[in-house]
Structure formats: C-alpha cells, structure tokens
Amino acid sequence: MPLFQHLIKTAALSAVLLSTPLALADDTTSTEPTPPPAQLPLEELRIFADVFNQIRQAYVEEVDDKTLLENAVKGMLTGLDPHSAYLDAKTFDDIKESTSGEFGGLGIEVGMENGFVKVISPIDDTPASKAGVESGDLIIQIDDKPIKGLSLDDAVKLMRGAKGSKITLTIVREGNDKPFDLVLTRAIIKVTAVRSKMLAPDYGYLRIAQFQGATGDNTTKEVKKLIAENQQPLKGLVIDLRNNPGGVLQASVKVVDNFINSGLIVYTEGRLQNSETRYSATEGDILNGAPIVVLINGGSASASEIVAGALQDHRRAVVIGTDSFGKGSVQTIVPLTEDKAIKLTTALYFTPDGRSIQAQGINPDIEVQRVKIEAIDDRRRITEADLQGHLNNGNGGDESNSAERERRKANQLIKDDNQLFEALNLLKGINILKPAAPVAETDKAA
C-alpha cells in the first residue's frame, strides 16, 4: 500500500531525527555517534495507517493530509508528558521571545490539569498579576469558549491577542465556592527578570521573576548595586523566587555561582550521553558568606527549584515559604525546520545531594504561609523622648522617637508581605547570634 509505505518512511525519518544530538539551552552539542534507529513496530504502523485512511474517507469534513500528519505529531508529543510539545511557527516564535524577555499576552505560565489550564504562576507586573490571577488557579473558560477538550497550545492561542484587547477568564480557585470571572487587558509583556532594593540598613532584597539568558549577570549587577548603596558589605540578603516559573537552566546555575565558592550546583541525567551534564561553582562569593534567605511557594518551578535546592544543599541559605511546584525535568528545543520545532523532555535534574524534585518540589526549611496580618496596636506612642525638657540618655544612641519610622516600616511590611517580614527577621536573628569579631590588642589597651 503506497500510503502505508509512506508512513513507514516518515516514521523512520522521525526516529533518526530524534536520535541525533540534542541542543541544550546554551546550544552546546555532542559529537557522540548516532545510534541506529530501533526496529519500528509494523502492527502499530498498520493501525495508524488504517486510522489515517478512515479519517480521510469518513470524517464529516474533509481534512488535508498535511493537517492530519501534523495533528498526529502533536498527539505523539502531548501524550508523553505535560511539557513536551510540537511548536508551530507562531509557538516557536513565542518561545524565543519569552526567553529574551519581551512577548505579547497576559503574563502567566500555564500547564494542563484534568483538561483545564492550570496557572503555574503569574509573572510580575503583567495583566495577569495585576488582575489577581494566582498560582494554582484553574482556567475553565476563555471569553465564551470552554477549555475542556482543547490542547494547551490551542488554549494559549486564545489567550493571546492584540495589545489593548480585553479577555475574560473564568477561574476555579481552591477555597471559593463557585467559579468567577476576571477581565484582563492584553499587553506586550516586558519582563524585568531581576530587581533589587534595600529592606533595611545592611539587609538587601533580590527579586528574580524569571530565568532568562542574562539573569545570572543581572543578579551580579544588582547585588553589587545593593552593596554600593549600603556603603558597606551586606549583613544578609533575601532572594525572592516566589511565583518564578523558571526558564533557562544555565541562568539558574550562574545565579547560584554568585553565592558559593565551590561544589556541584546541579546535574542532569537522560538517555542520551550529552543530556548528562554537571554544573559546578567557580571561586568567588559576592556576599563573602553573609547569610541568605530564599523565599519559595507553589509557583516556584524548574530553574527556581534548582537555585533553592542548590543553596539549601550547600547550607548556604535558609529556604522559607511553602512547597515549590515540583518540575524537575529539562526540555530541549529541537528545530525541525527554520520555523518549526519540538519541545522534548530529555533529562531530569538533581540537586547537589542527589535529590530529584520531580512531582515533589523543594520543601522549605521553615514553612511560612502567606497570610494577612494586622498589628494589634499600631498607634503612635508617647514616650519619655517626646516630653518637653527630657534628659538625654548619655549613651550616644538614637532616642526612641527616632526609631519610630523604622517601627512603622516594619509594621507596614508585615501587613503587605508577612513571608518577607519573616525572612528579614530571620536574617537579623542570625546576625545577632553570630560570634563577635575578636578585639585587637591595641583596641584593648585603648
């Protein structure tokens, strides 16, 4: 049968393509010899050809062969795991845009669960985060179109659109009795992957929203900027990886390398030899050993979990928050033509201690749920320092009313972000218990 022979040739060609060396995120390739393709199961190919013919002849609407074969490839990949996929020209472009930091849409990282779109995490400062989309939300309808029965690729296409156009997402959220609608306005998403600020004197905050190609270098720049702003070395740093969906593996390695002097950061294992890689740190800790607290939650996935797991295994950071997402696999983009590719899961990654977080996640050292907290007594207090003609304390330190601003800042932080408040308190506690530096003999004499 000519069609049957054609399908066998197509399947054999696909087998050869998939057994060639795969490019990792940094486009490094292996020179290992290509193994011969395995013997193809003729009975299953015959069934495939029969189904193909039945659709061509009996489906209610005529479908061209090209579309049928493309759909077969899509089904073959989506049947493997939630992250392998066929990338048509539009989707391939979207992938390239997302790793460069600018793309169109709503600003959410999504997957599929029970036939619905599940939000892995909203991206900072995007229509999704501003509208209140949360990690773990299930999107069951887009405008008036139900999601059930659509592929993830089709659902993502529905969410994309012209800048400024509106879209209604119907969401099911744990803890809510019934679905509700959120109206979002599409925008060009420009992701600022790394931001920083001073939380308090000597204590810095580093927010990593996504792992792009330049995230490692930008992390170095932002930490140096914090040190310069503080005008002396930092006593501690909070690295915020909450709702960070991941990204480029090599970027996560560079981030960890900023804070440890040596040792393994992450390693990957797969079926092909060049998918087994090990990434180790180089000399140099930008914080000179100052303590680190890493914040994670259920929206921290993939590269975020690599960073949290590596710093946790090296006892370089205390991880607080809630369990992470649990995506411990590595996807490789394999170009098929100039504008089409496949995204294929080629390896699992492991933390330095050999932990796989696949479908389990990183467990925080200290669990802190995100809650709303209100100070019981937030009134401005009258103290001795406020009384007219009060005596000076003689200690040379600040009087109590000069510390009022810091107290109010702390009260505002606990209201806005109790997890970040706990992270800052933990850093301060670690420094309180640090042994004091030895006093020089000349200082003793003085």
Image (cartoon, grey):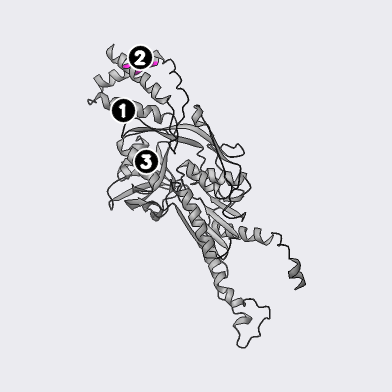
Quick check: 435 left or right of 207? right
Please give the label number shown on residue 95: 3
Residue 311 seen in render = yes
Crowd class of label 3 (few under 14; some 14 to 19; many from 20; radius 10 Å): some
Viewer can see residue 301: no
**Is 47 contained in the magenta span?**
yes
> How far, Cα to Cα, is label 1 from label 3?
19 Å
Q: Quadrant of residue 309?
A: top right
58 left or right of 278 in image: left
- The dot on residue 264 is none
Task: Please tell me how crowded label 1 is: few (under 14), some (14-19), or many (20+) other residues with Cα within 10 Å.
Answer: few
Amino acid, disc 2? Arg
Left or right: where 42 falls relative to 364: left
Which range is magenta?
Answer: 44-49
Residue, disc 2? 46
Which residue type does callout 1 highlight?
Answer: Glu
**Could you say whether the residue bearing mark 1 is in a helix, strand or loop?**
helix
Structural distance between the alpha carbons of marks 3 and 2: 35 Å
Disc 2 and disc 1: Cα gap in Å? 18 Å
Q: Which residue is at the far front?
A: 442
207 drawn magenta = no
